[in-house]
Amino acid sequence: MQETVDALKGAKPDENVVLHPKLLRVVEQGVPPRYAAAMEKTLALSVSEVPGEYYDDCVELISQIAKNTRGPGRYIANVFPGQMKEIRIQTDVIGREINTMSGVLAKLREQLGGC
């Protein structure tokens, strides 16, 4: 995901695509670099090696990625659909893995609570 975010920093809109003036202004005002900076900050979050804390850190990570994508990312998706699609796909994969961990941790917590 970091590579895709890095690619957005210096990305320029396709010259053959006609953009709405508002979207063009958003790109010119530097939303892609601000989005990239927010994503870099999010991706730099440390993740604990303790299983329960690891899960919580992963949930926080995915929620921050989603927040960034819903915020400035919503404008960028119209200008750079390929890059944002890749980020959404990667976010989906991470989210599915977290959901898998959720079930495993719930069973483990149930077993430990029952002892």
Image: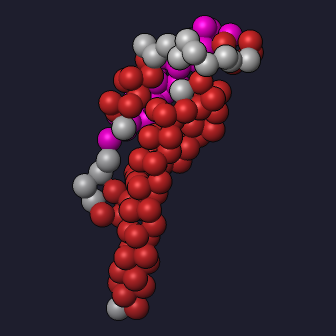
Residue at 61% from the left image edge and 19% from the top image edge: 17
Measured as percent of width and height from the top left, residue 1 is found at 36, 38
Q: In the displayed image of the protein, which residue is found farthest to the front?
A: 16
Q: Nearer the viewer, residue 37 or 87?
A: 87
- In this view of the protein, can residue 19 be seen by the observer? yes
Q: Nearer the viewer, residue 66 or 3?
A: 3
Residue at 39% from the left image edge and 23% from the top image edge: 7
Residue at 45% from the left image edge and 22% from the top image edge: 8
Q: Is residue 70 magenta?
A: no
> Which stretch is magenta?
25-46
Q: Quadrant of the C terminus?
A: bottom left
Relative to 83, 23 lies left or right: right
Q: Is residue 28 magenta?
A: yes
**What is the number of callouts on the image?**
0
Measured as percent of width and height from the top left, residue 52 is found at 36, 64
Residue at 40% from the left image edge and 54% from the top image edge: 94
Measured as percent of width and height from the top left, residue 77 is found at 59, 32
Measured as percent of width and height from the top left, residue 63 is found at 53, 47
User: Which secondary structure is most common in the magenta stretch?
Assistant: helix
Q: In the figure, 30 relative to 7: above or below?
A: above
Relative to 18, 104 lies left or right: left
- In this view of the protein, can residue 65 be seen by the observer? no
Q: In the displayed image of the protein, which residue is found farthest to the bottom?
A: 115
Q: In the figure, 10 relative to 75: above or below?
A: above
Color encoding of the figure: secondary structure
